[in-house]
Image: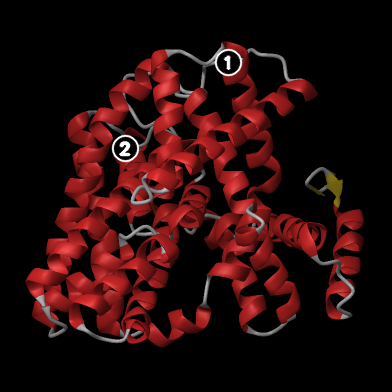
Amino acid sequence: MKTVKITGIPLPVYMAITLIVVMSIKMKWIPSGMLGALIVMMVFGGLFNIIGNNLPIVKTFLGGGAIVCIFASAVLVYTGLIPEVVVANIDNFMNEVGFLNFYIAALITGSILGMDRSLLLKAAIRFLPVALCAMTMAIMAVGIVGQIVGFGFIDAVMYVAIPMMGGGMGAGVVPLSGMYAEALNADSAGIISRMIPASTLGNVMAIVGAGLLAKLGEIKPSLSGNGKLMKNHHDSMKDGENQELTLQNLGMGLITAMFFFVLGTMINHFVPSIHAYAWMIILVAVSKAIGCIPGEFEAAAKQWSQFVMKNWTSALLVGIGMSMIDLGAVARAISPMYLLLVLVVVGGVAFGAGLGGKLVGFYSIESAITAGLCTTNMGGTGDIAVLSASKRMELLPFAQISTRICGALILIVASILVQVLF
């Protein structure tokens, strides 16, 4: 009989560790800071991941462990089973301490530097037009449906579609509410309360949709590249594949990832309208395209990103569920009409991106996920959740283009539309 292991630890030992962590949480003895947050996230992440990967319907249609990590964690918070002090510590670790930035920096750097150079150049030119055309199609579709069902064309576009595509809460909904409030001479709190449910529900539907698309790719293999975006091209992560894994390489990869994030943050201070992640993508992509990064650094960055992805993805998803998914807001927004409008946006952008991707030489599934679903989720955390649910984490750089660059363009469009439509 095969021994069940979680994160390499035999199940009985892992359950004993989990029991001790749970006891320390209930007694409020769990340490504060990074150590307390990370042990909770990793222990629950490993447990929820193996549960999700073995639940019949969930593992087949809904993304398996990723979806359980997120929503089981959100349920624990919503029901009060996790004390507020623990939730606050995890929220601080994820956002203020910067664990989310740390994770995303590793994956962006490793994914881009691990790509084949010719793939990067060919795909980047085609990707942005596909995403923008898909978003335009979805915006028009939800406006028309909104008019038909009595919600209103303008309200469906400005309060459902635009908040869903703005790049998340901090980069999208918050600045959008400020724009709307200034243009309408209204209270931003009332406006943001109308936008949050759309952003949250869009994120949920995008995650579930990613799992369904991954299943569709298994049923119709011709539609899927199994993690590769472009057709007629070898694996996008082959560069540096034969480099020996050493502890020193992991250190090199860590420094390389942090260096590019620091550079992106520095430029963001001078050009704040473009997110630091977007600058980081541009810097890494340009460095890869012109070949100025030595091969050993590229291989080290790839190995470091794989280490981070292997060991901390489930933990990060638990952090997302506990600190960024408000089940109360989701429940309050649920009505047949509202769900229909959100579904039109998510379905429309996925269909448009899948069709557009096919026309430019992308695999439809990968294009629908990255150029489609990743435009409607909640920023970097949403990208990770969507790609985890579809088991395509290597596509994070393209997902970030959808979230950050397209999200920034949506803000510009919204600032014009709010003056014209209201």
Q: Specify the quadrant of the image occupied by residue 150.
A: bottom left
The answer to whether residue 298 is left or right of residue 355 is right
Q: Which mark is residue 223?
A: 2
Residue at (73% x, 20% y) in the render: 245
Q: Which mark is residue 132?
A: none
Residue 116 horizontal/vertical position (percent): 44, 18
The answer to whether residue 34 is left or right of residue 56 is right
Q: Is residue 229 depicted above or below 207 in this figure?
A: above
Q: Which residue is mark 1?
A: 240
Q: How far, Cα to Cα, is label 2 from label 1?
A: 28 Å
Residue at (25% x, 82% y) in the render: 337
Q: Which quadrant, please, contains the C terminus? A: bottom left
Residue at (92% x, 62% y) in the render: 16
Residue at (21% x, 47% y) in the render: 132
Residue 77 horizontal/vertical position (percent): 65, 78
Q: Which quadrant, please, contains the N terminus? A: top right
The front one of 50 and 362 is: 362
Residue 48 horizontal/vertical position (percent): 68, 61
Circle nearer the viewer, 2 or 1: 1
Q: Which amino acid lies under the numbered mark 1 shown in the image of this protein?
A: Gly
Q: Is residue 62 depicted above or below 254 in this figure?
A: below
Element under disc 1: loop
